[in-house]
Image (cartoon, rainbow, N blue to C red):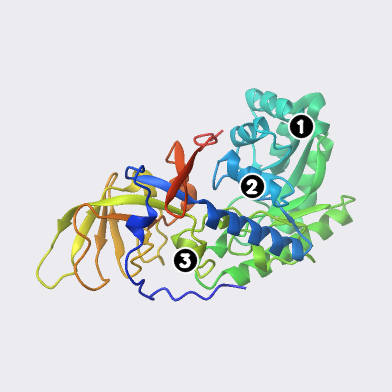
Amino acid sequence: MPISVDHNEPRPGSRDAAAIPQEVDTPEILVDVDALDRNITRMAQAVQAKGLALRPHAKTHKIPEIAARQLAAGAAGLTVATIGEAEVFAARGVDNIFIAYPLWISSRKAERLRRLAATAVISVGVDSASGAAMLGEGLGEAAGDVAVLVEIDSGHHRSGVRPEAAATVAKAASDAGLQVAGVFTFPGHSYAPGMPADAAAQEQAALNQAAEVLAAAGFEAKVRSGGSTPTALLTEGSAATEVRPGVYVFGDAQQFELGRCALEDISLTVATTVVSHHTIAPGTPARFILDAGSKILGSDRPAWATGFGRLIDHLEARVVALSEHQATVEWHDGGAPPPIGTRLRVIPNHVCLAINLVDEVAVVRQGQLVDRWSVAARGKNR
C-alpha cells in the first residue's frame, strides 16, 4: 500500500549540516547506509511474503556493494539495462542476470554475450521476430545458453509487443535456437500521480494474457516478470513470478511526491552549499543559489513535479531552476533563508540520472563518513 506522506509538513530546524560529514566537499552524493539497508530489507521481505522473486534493477545504483546487499537479502538475481552493466556485475560474482532490453546484436555484442553466458545465467529481452533471429544468429552455437523473455507492452507504450503478439516473437526466438523462458513488462506509466494501481492492474492483465497466448502456442511462460518501484508492492503472484524495482533502494523526489516512499526512506541526497543570494524584486520570495546543478542532480522534471528536486530538511523550499553547476532555490520556509556557506542536502528528482553522473559516492552513517563506493557500472551504455 502507498505510504501516506504530508508533503507540506515543515521540518523543525535544519539537520543538514550535522548530516554532512566534514570530510565531504560539495557537491557530492551521500548514501545513508542505514536507510539503504532498511529499504533493501523491507522490499525483500514484502516481495517474499507475496510469493514472488525479487530481481532488482541495478541500473539505478550501478554499485557492486549495493548489489551484494540485495543478493544477501534474498534477491534471485539482478536486472540490468545493457551488456556493459551485466559485465560489471558478473565480474563481481553475480551469477544470474537479466538484460531487460530488446538488444539488436552486432558481432561484437554477440561475442560479449557468449562470454557472459559462460560465467553466469543470462537472459535477454526480445520484442520482435527480427531481433530474435539476429540474436540467435549472432550467438550461433551458444544460442541455447541464453534465455529470452518476450517484452510485452502493458500500457507504457515504449518497447514491447501487445500480449496477443507474444507467440510470434517466441516462435522466432525458438527457431533461432534460443530458450524461451517467459514474458516481461515495464509498467512505466506508473510514474505519475494516481497511476500506480491502474498500471499494476494493466501489468497483471497483460502478463496473464501473454502467458495464455504462449501456452496456446506450446510455450510455457515459466517467468512472468513485472514491477516498477511504484507498482512492485501492488503486483500479485497470480500474474507475475518476479518483480524488478530499482529506485526503492534510494528513493527520490519523484517517489516522495507520488507518496511511494516516506522522507525517512530517502537514502541518497546531494550535499551542496549555498554560494549566492539573489532577490528579483521586493515582495517576491527570497532566492539563493546552490553549487549543485544538472551535472550532479540530473535535469529530469516531470510536468507534475514541484521542482527540480527537494531540500530534505526544508520541504517548503522549491528548486525552481537548474544550470549545469547551479540550482536556484525559492525560499518559502519562513524566516531568513540560509546564509551563504550553509551546507544543505537535496533529494534529486530522478535518482537513476544523478548516480550516473558521478564516479563514486560517499557512504555515511549518522553523519559520519564510513566508506566510499565506486559507481562501477557508470557509463556502461552498450
Of residue 141 and residue 372, the one placed in the foreground of this image is 372
Q: Amino acid at mark 2?
A: Arg
As helix, strand or loop, the secondary structure at mark 1 comes to helix
Say the numbered circle drawn on residue 58: none
**Residue 36 quadrant:** bottom right
Of residue 218 and residue 299, the one placed in the foreground of this image is 299
Of residue 166 and residue 341, the one placed in the foreground of this image is 341
Other residues around mark 3 within 10 Å, as few (<14) / some (14–19) / many (≥20): some
Q: CA distance from mark 1 to mark 3?
A: 46 Å
Quadrant in which the C terminus is drawn:
top right
Position of 190 with respect to 119 (left or right) is left
Q: Identify whether 130 is placed above or below 207.
A: above
Task: Give the x, y percent position of residue 38.
Answer: 59, 59
Tell me the residue that label 2 is attached to: 69
Front disc: 1 or 3? 3
Residue under the point 80% across and 66% down:
238
Say the numbered circle drawn on residue 136: 1
Quadrant in which the N terminus is drawn:
bottom right
Tell me the residue that label 3 is attached to: 263
Q: CA distance from mark 3 to mark 2?
A: 22 Å
Circle count? 3
Q: Identify whether 357 is placed above or below 161.
A: above
Residue under the point 38% across and 48% down:
21
